[in-house]
Amino acid sequence: MTLLTKRQKLAVLMSVFVLVHNIRARVAHEIDSLEPNLYRYEFTYYPQLPVKVSWDIDDLNFAIYFRIQVEMELDDVIGIGFSNYGDIKNADLALFWFDSDTGPHLQDMYTNEEEIIQPDEQQDYKLTTVDVKRDKVIIEFERSYETDDVNDYSIDRGTTHVIAFLERTSRMMENGMKLKQEDIKLNRVQLLKSQLPEPKLPSDVQVLHVHVNQVEVPLDETTYWCSLQQLPHFKSKLHIIRFEGAINEETQGIVHHLEVFHCQVEAHVILPPYDAPCSSKSERPLGLESCTKVLGAWAMGAKGISYPDEAGVPIGGKTFSRYIMLEIHYNNPRHMSGLIDNSGITFFITDKLRKYDAGVMEIGLEYTDKMALPPGLKEWKLNGYCVSRCTKIALPNKGIYVFASQLHAHLTGMKIYTKHYRDGVELPELNRDNHYSPHFQEIRRLHRVVRLMPGDEIVNTCVDQTSERKNVTLGGFSIYDEMCVNYIHYYPITDLEVCKSSIATEYLYEIFSFFKWIYNEPIDISKGISYNYQIISWNNEKIHDLKAFYDSSPLSVQCNRSDGERFPGTWEPYPIPMKVNKMRQK
């Protein structure tokens, strides 16, 4: 491509301004859309790419508006788009470039299976404004959440993998418009955020930092570190109204997630000091088993969460134990040495008490090796049940109100959704992420406050992919084990802390015996669950049998109080809620 002279560049810029004038005359905006503060959300690709993305949404008209600010030359092309998990195959793209004769262009394009950029026959991106300010080009365009074009990405309320690239037009033409993975930059974001009013933080809040102190991150791949600490002496009850992660820059990517637990002991009880690894219960001194009530949590990618104006998490007072435990999951697969960590959570506290005390509840699968994911599968579903008997005895008569949710799984997790049932009727889902990433686990405010009533049933489903695994994946705490849980934030607080399930142990031994009898597998019950899952030579027939077993066998239910004890009742074996598959959509 021939380089433009200054006169030619000026001519192009003039054509841009003429085009902007014409577009603005045609497009009926109520506001000057070039004002950056009119876009409520933004992220940048700096320093990898000189691109800033701002956006806003219109839920009534199902439209999303983008503002792209980019440092580019007049012979560059900027591409912004969406794809499944950041893939460059079958990506939905909007390409913008300048033409020396006709001015700026925005074109709806996509990549095929060969990763070659193709023009889309149906143009669903609408260019609204273009502006040039000093060394920056500002582009504004819009599109609908969903279109009827098979080449377009459906923008939903879950995680969106937004890809971007900036390239010389001539180089792209030389490469046959083939997109390369190394050329793109990726950012994960929830585009369609909750439109419920964002609570404002009062000016007179107290700030409390809970963090570890100069922890040298162990060389082990997976480490859980526990730090027992004491809160300041709060003479009267206070409310936590916001919390957010405070992660060291040096250990970002190493700190996978962390939680702050309150220790459920009487105020006069003294617990032994502890600040060390705690990956197993045997490593923890007596007394730390009482530290189970969640005050705050963070995971990779999460932002802070503010509580509704009517609720806050209670701390302090004469009968409130000052002991808390900060638990951090370090993921150090490269066994990096010399990393010093001071990460934790920052709490914002008020003495102006709100109407309700708020809490956090775990819903989904128990952290146990009783649940397994066979290798080599594109899709494997596991369900974790919060059963109706548990909610019937544990929730207050008027129910609870869920306002936020954090979905959590490990490396094989691809999709998570939480179903809600009442009296044989499926209600609207509590949460869903069709493109879940373990590297982006936000606590998300729900688009509507959900009321859970006594007797309701909640089913948390994880869809995992093990196509690159050579052996079975088990439930557990390592990043290479799996989890499937939804942390729901709600009010008013109850004693119910954990509402989860796993397969009843005695029935799991039956399937092991079945594999030994039918397939002659070298099962040895005395060697434990993990050994027997791992010794099986998995094939399609055995995988089918395991799936049928999971879908029909009784459960072991965790219907646990905040002190770790189960509510009274018979929880194992508990009949699997078969009616779930027959419920009609309300």
Image: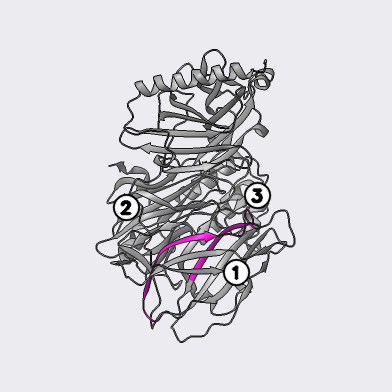
Q: Secondary structure at mark 3?
A: loop
Q: Which mark is residue 185?
A: none
Residue at 32% over, 70% down: 352
View extreme (bottom): residue: 268
Depth order, front residue of 186/406: 186
Q: Is residue 188 above or below residue 475?
A: above
Q: Farthest residue to the front: give it.
A: 7
Image depth: mark 2 or mark 3 in front: 2
Tag 3 residue: 536
Which numbered disc, 2 or 3, marks the residue that appears first in the sequence? 2
Quadrant location of residue 358?
bottom left
Q: Which residues are magenta?
A: 235-261
Where's the N terminus, which quadrant? top right
- Kindly report the distance in space between the C-alpha atoms of the residues bearing marks 2 and 3: 43 Å
Report crowding for label 3: few under 14, some 14 to 19, many 20 or more residues within 10 A (C-alpha): many
Q: Please tell me how many numbered marks the rendered image carries.
A: 3
Residue 450 image label: 2
366 is within the stretch colored magenta: no
Depth order, front residue of 37/402: 37
Rendered location of residue 475, percent (x, y)? 57, 55
Q: Farthest residue toward the top?
A: 101
Q: Nearer the viewer, mark 3 or mark 1?
A: 1
* Mark seen at residue 212: 1
